[in-house]
Amino acid sequence: MKRRGFVALLIGLIFDPFRSLALALCNPALVRLQKQGRNLVQVRPGKSPQLGHYFIQWYGHSSFLIHSGSQTKVVADPNFNVTPGIQADAVTVSNDHFTHNNTGAVTGDPVILRGITFRQTWNPIRTSVKDISIINIPSQRGQSWGGAANSIFIYEMGSLCLAHLGNIGHLLTAEQEKVLQRVDVMMVPIDAMTNLGFDDILKVIEQVKPPIVIPMHFDVVRQGELFAGFAKEHYPVKTFSESQLILSRAMLPKSTEVFVLAHPRAVSLGE
């Protein structure tokens, strides 16, 4: 083998795992972001268990467990109602409100990925935790919060791309819209009090057009019902009797649908 060919092969072997990681991301725009700061967060190594189901599980409010096919676990926005003792490999925090940052409720020595700093500025995350790639983009919580920072987290696992909007308080910018264009599952806040109203949330959904929209950030059953009633004038709405949703490319709708998961800790207005 010629020296030039050998050197090229050697370089390819060294960098191919990183290239594969980048190319696996669900949007080319994310590949560029990933290259800008791969080492910003320390990732704990470990062997991946046997392949299984991809799923997400809602724990109420904005808290989700994201579970990869090799059982990598990421908890998004743990709040005070998350069952203490849940184990995960990583925790992501979209904003520093106490209903989103209860990282102490998660065990297993997880990597803590805070989307904003303690000074309320955006903290860029570009990393991978085992087989889940995690990236965030900056946003804000809205005028009622004085423009406080919010972080939109994007998770890629297998061939699936998920986005958690945190407490977004504005329509997407052109750049944000571009980065989110290939999202398969988008978790959106629908309380319409401290976040966007129903009309604007539907505008954000239309900007991205994800196959699956999952309402979050509500604790009263009636609030979820009101949003479902409003959304069904624009998109098909499916309600589920469980708070867990198994994911695969085959189950993705061809166009946007709203999936309302059963609230694990919801209260009614009469309680």
Image: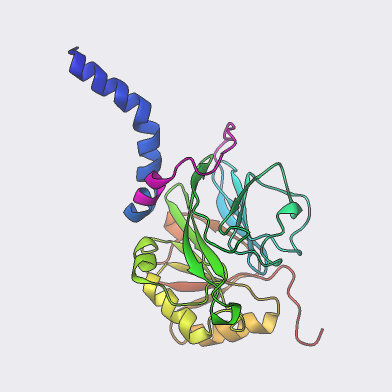
Question: Is 153 left, or right, of 87 in this rendering?
Answer: left
Q: Main secondary structure of the magenta part?
A: loop
Question: Is 7 left, or right, of 44 in this rendering?
Answer: left
User: Residue 65, image x and y in percent?
Assistant: 63, 55
Query: Camera-side residue: 111 or 221?
Result: 111
Residue 48 highlighted magenta (yes or no): yes
User: Residue 200, image x and y in percent?
Assistant: 47, 83
Asked if residue 132 shows in the view, the reply is: no
User: Looking at the image, which residue sits at the far right?
Assistant: 271
Q: How many marks?
A: 0
Query: Camera-side residue: 97 or 89?
Result: 97
Question: Is 219 left, or right, of 122 in this rendering?
Answer: right
User: Residue 152, image x and y in percent?
Assistant: 50, 63
Give the residue at x 42% y 50%: 159
Q: Quadrant of the N terminus?
A: top left
Residue 22 highlighted magenta (yes or no): no
Asked if residue 153 shows in the view, the reply is: yes
**In the rendered view, how is the structure colored?**
rainbow
Give the residue at x 36% y 64%: 181
Give the residue at x 25% y 19%: 7
Q: Quadrant of the C terminus?
A: bottom right
Question: Is 193 left, or right, of 205 in this rendering?
Answer: right
User: Residue 178, image x and y in percent?
Assistant: 34, 64
Residue 152 lies, with reference to residue 1, above or below; the image says: below
Residue 160 lies, with reference to residue 201, above or below; the image says: above
User: Which residues, given as a range, are shown in magenta?
Assistant: 32-51
Residue 235, image quadrant: bottom left
